Image (spheres, coloured by chain):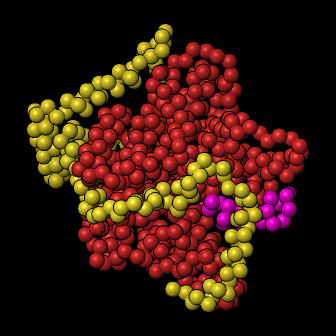
Chain colours: A yellow, B red
Amino acid sequence: MSDPDKHSDTTGEADNAREEVAQTEPARAPLPDVEGLAHTMSPVDLPEPDQPLPNPLAWTFTVIATAGIFLALFNSGSIRSWSYELKPSPVSEHVVSASEGWFNVTSSAGLEVPVDAMRGWWKGVQNARFPGQDPTPQTETGPEAEAPEPVQ
Amino acid sequence: MLFPTLTFGWFFLAVFLATWSLQRSNEWRKILLLAASWVFYGAWDWRFVALLILSGILNWGAARLILASGDNERARKAWLILGIVLNLLILGFFKYYGFFMEQVSATLHAIGWERDLYIMEVILPVGVSFFTFQGMSYVIDVFRRQTAPASLLDMTLLMSFFPHLVAGPIVRASHLIPQFKEAPRITRGMAAMGVLLIVWGLFKKSVVASELAINFVDPVFFDPSAHSPTDLTFAAYGYAVQIYCDFSAYSDMAIGLAALLGYRFPHNFNQPYRARSLQDFWRRWHISLSSWLRDYLYISLGGSRHGLTRLCLALGTTMLLGGLWHGASWNFVIWGALHGGVLAIERLWREFKPKTWPALPAFLGIIITFHIVLLGWIFFRSHTFADAMAFLGGLGGSAESALLTPLMLGLIVFGMALHALPPRAIQNVAIKVRAMPGVLVGLGIGVLILIIDSMRPEGVAPFIYYQF
């Protein structure tokens, strides 16, 4: 830490800078949030709850673990696709084999059905056209669109 | 390693478990975070990890030398200038060397010196603009005695911390170093906001921004002359939505990831397209950069202390340099000049508007401001000035659209409608979520990620701001 006296010696300079900011930006943006949440230091600053909420870390672990297990069960296809993108190596061979095995287990139990149904519905939304519109427009995409990194 | 990938998911899970298991030693926790951040950065190119470390040491060293100079203002200023110059040299070399040499070569050709110059191919390190600006702000803040000096570990972690390393927010030392000094704590509110911001960012990036980019905006901007005025018009609106959803998604995810590790990052976006003036826009868009430019550039250029002419010059110069910060291209210069020019006009209008004249209605201010921003985005997105002019030349009139599908129109409307939501919508959801059982919240998050994953296109394009 620096000597606090040195800080006090130059608080005037800091104050000048702050004053300058205030002069430059004389009026704050008319934010519609009158209760002050948008003025907090961070978006993750929430008002304190009326009752203290216990075990925050355990709660966070539970949320992440539950979401992870849910996705491992219902979206094993994505894990398999991800494993195919790994650089070939003895380790990645094991990963591919394990992810394929897991995919076979979950799909044989019908757990891939919801995500497949969702993908089918979304495909329909993507393919929808306005009346009279060419059903398959040509899209010459250019370098940006060709660039996506093929990872899952 | 991109946020919306499973590779990053595994990485973050490992970091999350490891850091919270080191709660007893904050120093070891920070060392682990630093090592993880270097692994994250090294996933692009290991060579540039050395640059990141060097940059951290350089800024830490410059700040130490400023402190060691005590009350010798001359020496303090000399170390400050040296620190800034070294930072600018790093930034300038990687970002502007190629552009500069091309301009020199073109000039020499124009005056008849026909020899080809050897122009070295320089790879742009991801996020160099962000971590350089972050380092510079630390040195300047120490000089101004606005922040306490940081240890080498804290300083290198400030610059390398992986959630904000490659595309911001530009987190000031005064905001993050005090957090590093204490063992982080997490609340259920922070965690709820963290997971919600991550899922929300995932949706904006993977579904809205990617879908618009791949199937509409990129094809139109690639060859504007091949598309109808309707497609061009909607592609401009589409890009406005795409860049907002892309960039704000990165910020949301960065803020959310940091929150899950126990750190609080500042706001970076606040519904920018509902701004009533360009000044208001810059208080809502990339807030960490605009406040950086204001505090370290605009004020240093004189700000409002030396009259209206100097103020307008400072505004113009700040925005021009803000444009060049994005890269060495005339289109970025035009983008910056447009913003600087309109900011100056707004300022003059405020000064000289007759008091009897009524104020502009809010909705009109929003529409005008948005369309000025939209004009800027056309230059920002186009590869060359000629492309931008071809795009603008093709606007107007009406013709059938080949690419504008109901989905594209829906996404554009959705992206704009986000700006009409209550500003604290996510916080209000988080307040409810934090009181729910963890298993229920986890299931809800799992369902949402499953839906997003089934909607997103194959593969993940890098975030737009990775190139800056």
B329 relative to B264 in the view: left or right = right
Q: Quadrant of residue A85?
A: top left
Rendering coords of residue B411 (x, y %): 48, 30
Residue B15 to residue B357: above or below: below
Q: Residue at x 24, y 55 (%)?
A: A62
Q: Is residue A103 magenta?
A: no
Q: Residue at x 65, y 47 (%)?
A: B281
Observer able to see residue B117: no
The residue nearer to you, when weighing B223 against A35, is A35
Q: Quadrant of residue B455?
A: top left
Residue B179 to residue A92: above or below: below
Rendering coords of residue B108 (x, y %): 72, 51
Q: Farthest residue to the front: give it.
A: A50
Q: Residue at x 75, y 45 (%)?
A: B342
Residues drawn in magenta: B291-311
Q: Residue at x 68, y 43 (%)?
A: B276
